[in-house]
Amino acid sequence: MDGLKERLLTEASEVGFIDCRVCRPDAVPEVPDRLQAFVASGYHGQMTWMEERMHWRGNPAALWPEARSVILLAESYTPSHDPLAVLEKPELGAISVYAQGRDYHDVVKKRLKRLARWLMAEAAALDPQVKVFVDTAPVPEKALGQASGLGWQGKHTNLVSRTWGNWAFIGSIFTTIDLAPDAAEIDHCGSCRACLDICPTDAFPAPYQLDARRCISYLTIEHKGPIPEKLRPLMGNRIYGCDDCLAICPWNKFAVTARDIRLSSRPELVAPKLAELARLDDAAFRTLFSGSAVKRIGRERFVRNVLYAIGNSADLSLRPVAADLTSDPDPTVSDAAGWALAQLSD
């Protein structure tokens, strides 16, 4: 259909996306081998779903064989503050920027559905079908993003763009419409290794490789149970996710301001006090993080993270807070409290 893709790009911008590109579902033939090597090395840790859905994640064309095009879209969540500044204040907690606002799954998916509905109406004569995804299905968004020209997978394995840096959520629309694909992006990291050198836990075995078992984002969000003791001191005051490798990327000089106010940081989540967070019961936790991605890990895992941060704080005034939680009914929380108390011993 003449001009459909051009109109799609215009509509994507009007809907609120900062970038829109297209590729074929079979444009990432390298993914299966990379995924197999990742899982074989054990780098996925407790994320068994990666192994169980490897066939689909490794081959987007198998996820929906009828699809002819994948539309990749970027949604900015660039912070208005320096996300690394809180790391210098050990009595406060560092929450990853993406989780300081509204849960991106809700925000981005609604925008994707809006664009998909427009596409179906615009190309009604083709009787199109669409499926939308945003980090909730076995879709290799970052690989597809590079294949579509949206950006390239940097040495920290996240998608980077020369026009909007790396502060962006990636969503996709699979469709039966045959759209002209864009040229793939090439690597522009050069000799830079800032993201590798700043990692507090040395989670990158090599450039472009991530061992999730050492990644603070994985440890604070996906890992269940006690975190290995050797890694706890390296976590500092990071209590949900880690932005170090993203924040240090020099391509962020081109970062685009977030368009949706719902993705802006809530002031109370930018640098919350550890003492207050540790005292949250389940109801208070759910209230504070209502609408936030943090809510999905639950109170116990979150307070576990807070207690590790308390143990790393060197703030003796936090000893009573840790002591109060040594008898918490959750064994992981009580273990973390005991560890924190030991770290704060005179």
Image (cartoon, rainbow, N blue to C red):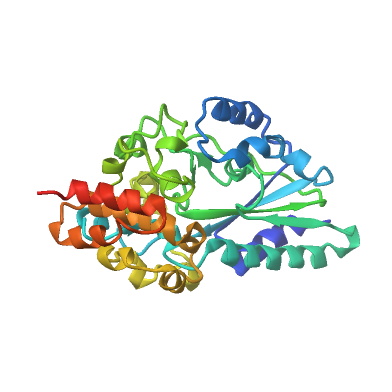
Position of residue 341 relative to residue 123, above or below, is: above
Splitting the image into 4 quarters, where does residue 189 fall?
Answer: top left
Residue under the image location 64 percent in, 40 percent down: 183
Q: Would residue 15 be found to the left or right of residue 310 on screen?
A: right
For the residue pair 176 and 275, the one nearer the viewer reads as 275
Q: Is residue 97 in view from this perspective?
A: yes
Q: Would residue 120 be found to the left or right of residue 159 on screen?
A: right
Q: Position of residue 49 (x, y in %)?
A: 62, 41
For the residue pair 318 and 12, the one nearer the viewer reads as 318
For the residue pair 167 and 4, the one nearer the viewer reads as 167
For the residue pair 120 and 50, the one nearer the viewer reads as 50
Q: Would residue 69 be found to the left or right of residue 259 on screen?
A: right
Residue under the image location 24 percent in, 58 percent down: 323
- Which residue in the rendered view is the most extreme toward the left? 346
Residue under the image location 19 percent in, 46 percent down: 343
Position of residue 100 relative to residue 34, above or below, is: below
Splitting the image into 4 quarters, where does residue 119 fall?
Answer: bottom right
Q: Position of residue 44 (x, y in %)?
A: 52, 35
Position of residue 289 relative to residue 249, above or below, is: below
